[in-house]
Each structure stands twice: as structure tokens, then as C-alpha cells.
Image: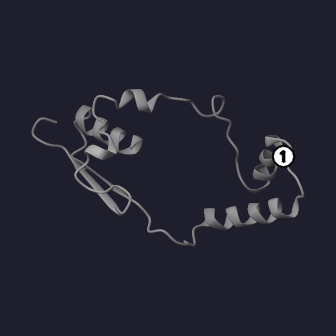
Amino acid sequence: MTVLGKMAKLLSELKNFQHITLMFPVAGHSFLPSDRVFGHIEKVIRKKDTIVSPFEYKEIFDTFGTVKSIGNDVAVLNWKGAIQSVERATSQLHFKFAPSKRLKKKKGVNG
């Protein structure tokens, strides 16, 4: 719901957006490079008997990609608070959320 709320906020506040299309991948396996990286990480983790510290995960992740620290390398923003004026609960939507494959949001007459 946070993504949908952010889309609604963008449409209501910014004049250069007329519509936004959000596409969800169909469940199953894809052949993206990120999937291969996760496969390599899983192999390494399976070979370890125990992982005691979160830093051990970070070391493994560092060998396969760039790891950024939340709060230090990536800003923490309050998206949930920012979208409260335009967000609706999932129970108030006119469609079932889970089976959706594609959601399209258009700017109306009132923004």
C-alpha cells in the first residue's frame, strides 16, 4: 500500500505526471542477474553450520555486491506519514489486491 500511496501523492502534487503504471512480476522464477546473485549467496550460507552475527551475513553479501547501511548510506524517510492524506486501506479498494498483476493510476479532474 505504501507504493500505491506514494503514486497517488505524486499524481496529486506534481503537475508533470499524467499517469503512472506499476507492473508486478508474475510469481515464479525469472532469469535476472539479481536472481543469480541470490543463488550464489544461498550456496555460501548453506555451507555454514551456524551464523551467529548479522555481520557474518554482511560479509557474505559484500563478496557478491555493494552493501549499503540504512541510516548511513541510505536516508530513512517517513513515506507512511507522507501518504496518509491520499492512502486508502486495502479493504476500501474496489478490487482484490493480491491477484493483481498491473495497477494503473491516472490523475483526475480534481488532481
Q: Which residue is mark 1?
A: 56
Give residue 12's position: percent from left, percent from top. 23, 35
Question: What residue is rendered at 29% in x and 39% in y?
Answer: 88
Question: What residue is rendered at 34% in x and 44% in y?
Answer: 4
Give residue 63's position: percent from left, percent from top. 80, 54
Q: Check the image and report above or below for 74 versus 27.
A: above
Q: Name the one closer to the observer, 4 or 60.
A: 4
Q: Name the one closer to the observer, 28 or 8.
A: 28
Q: Residues within 10 Å of mark 1 (few under 14, many from 20)?
A: few
Q: Check the image and report above or below for 83 versus 100.
A: above
Give the side of residue 25 with respect to residue 104, left or right. Answer: right
Q: Secondary structure at mark 1?
A: helix
Q: Name the one closer to the observer, 38 or 17.
A: 38
Question: What residue is rendered at 71% in x and 66% in y?
Answer: 39
Q: Quadrant of residue 8?
A: top left
Residue type pointed to by label 1: Glu
Give residue 42's position: percent from left, percent from top. 75, 63
- In the rendered picture of this protein, how many numbered marks are placed on residues? 1
Here the colouring is one colour
Q: Check the image and report above or below for 44 versus 92.
A: below
Question: What residue is rendered at 32% in x and 61% in y?
Answer: 102
Q: Quadrant of the N terminus?
A: top left
Q: Quadrant of residue 109?
A: top left
